[in-house]
Image (tube, rainbow, N blue to C red):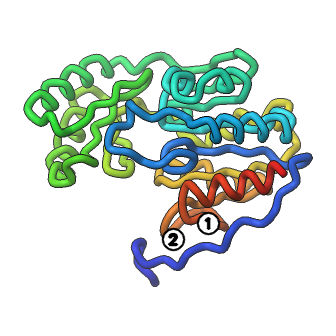
Amino acid sequence: MLSRSHQPALAPPPAIDPASHSLFVDFDGTLVPLVDHPELVRADAELVELLTTLHRRFAGRVALVSGRSIAQLDQMVGPIAAGIALAGSHGAEVRRDGRLIEPPRPEGLDGAIADVRLYGAGHPEMIIEEKSHGVAMHYRVAPILEEPVKRRAQAIAERHGLIVQPGKMMVELRGAGWNKGEAVEALMAEPPMAGSRPVVIGDDLTDEPALAVAGAMGGFGVLVGPGRESAALYGLADVGSVRRWLWEVAA
C-alpha cells in the first residue's frame, strides 16, 4: 500500500451541471492560498466576481464550508458573503438566507484561550487565531514549534474539555460534536440544495467528512493539493486550478 505522502495524484473532476449540482467549497488552501498570517487574508476582486457568478449560475446552490468563523468569512469575503450559504467553525455554524444555526459556545473555550495566550506570550512566532467556537495555534512561520505546540494544545484541550483539531501547520482547540460533513448534510436537506448532487472541494483533513458525504449523497469530492488517502474521487493541484475549474463550470 502506498503511504499517505506517496499517493498518486487524482484525476481532474468532470464537468458538472449547474442545474443539478450544488457546490460546497473550502476557503483557505482552496480558494485562497495558505499564508503565514491568516488574519490578513481577504478575497481579491477576481474571487468575489467568481463567487458572484457561481451564486447566480447555480441559483443559490453554492456554499463556503470553512474552519473560519462566519464572522471571519464575512470580513474576508465582503458583501457577497451575505448572499451565499456559509458553514463556519468546521461546521458548527451554518447560515443561509440570514438564518444562523449554531451550538452554544464551548464552556471551556474562554479558559483555553487564556492558556493559549499565556503560551503564546513566550512564543511570539506562533500565531493565535481566536474564533467563535475555537482557537487556533499556527506554527507555519516557525515549523520547529510543531511538536511543542501539539503537546501544549493537547494539554490545554484536556484541561478545558475540548478536542484538538489538526490542520496544515496548525492545531485548533474546539468543542466536540460537529464537522463539515454535518454542515453539508444540513444544507442539502433544504431548498434550494435539496434534491441536487453535492460537489465538495477542500484541501485539508478537516474537509474529509464533507468529501465523504458528497460521495454518499450521489455527488463527489475534489481534493486540492498533492495526492493522499482521501474520500475524494478527483483532484486539483492548487488554488489556481480550483479557480480555473470553477470558471469553466460557471461558463
Name the residue at 29% across, 17% down.
110
Viewer-nearest residue: 196 or 11? 11
Query: Badge 1: how crowded within 10 Å, few (<14), some, or many (20+)?
Result: many
Name the residue at 14% across, 47% down.
148
Name the residue at 24% across, 45% down.
139
Q: Which mark is residue 235?
A: 1
Viewer-nearest residue: 74 or 5? 74
Q: Position of residue 72 (x, y in %)?
A: 49, 25
Viewer-nearest residue: 214 or 31? 31
* Disc with the residue nearer the chain's start (1 vs 2): 2
Q: Position of residue 97 (x, y in %)?
A: 75, 19
Q: Are marks 1 and 2 in contact (CB under 8 Å)?
A: yes
Name the residue at 62% across, 35% down.
45
Q: Amino acid at mark 1?
A: Gly
Q: Secondary structure at mark 2?
A: loop
Residue that extends furthest to the front in the rendered view of this protein? 45
Dividing the picture into quarters, in which one does residue 107 lie?
top left
The residue under label 2 is 227
